[in-house]
Image (cartoon, grey):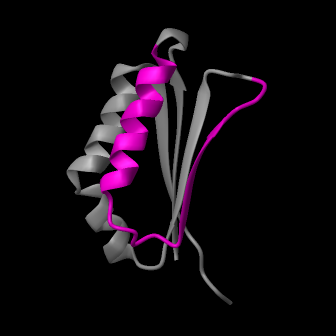
Amino acid sequence: MYILKIKGTVLKNKKMEFMQTLNFMFKQLPQKWSRSHIANDIIQNDIYYFDSKWESKEDLEEFMSNKNYKIMIGAFKVLGLNHEITIDEIIDT
């Protein structure tokens, strides 16, 4: 199982456009993940988090090569100041 995490700072005057872009992207994606969500930091209001959980590395890689993933990363880049991407592998023991 894999967890994709993206954290980014979105400019205050670009929040509406950012959320509209992500909403558009989510409506077009096949539901291959077992969960995903976007959250806004309640203390640092300009920080957004995207988390998604994937059953296989292949499904995650397919998502990351999809044009909608590129749209989401583009939204973080163009409408924000910075972003971080991490991928964690969850191993059952």
The quarter of the picture where residue 33 lies is bottom left
Q: Position of residue 58 (x, y in %)?
A: 31, 75
Magenta stretch?
14-43
Name of the residue lying farthest toward the top: 13
The residue at 41%/23% (across/down) is 17
Q: Quadrant of the C terminus?
A: bottom right
Farthest residue to the bottom: give it: 93
Residue 13: image location, x then y, percent: 49, 9
Q: Nearer the viewer, residue 87 or 73?
A: 73
Query: Is residue 26 on the magenta stretch?
Result: yes
Residue 31: x %, y % from top left:
40, 69
Among the 4 quarters of the image, the one containing residue 91 = bottom right
Please determine whether, in this image, residue 92 is positioned above or below residue 85.
below
In percent of the image, x 41 and y 79: which residue is there? 56
Q: Residue at x 41, y 39 (%)?
A: 22
The answer, for residue 81, to whether it is visible in the render is no
Question: Percent x, y for residue 68?
Answer: 27, 48
The image quarter in which residue 9 lies: top right
- Membership of 49 in magenta stretch: no
Q: Is residue 32 left or right of residue 38?
A: left
Q: Nearer the viewer, residue 22 or 55?
A: 22
For residue 17, above or below residue 38: above
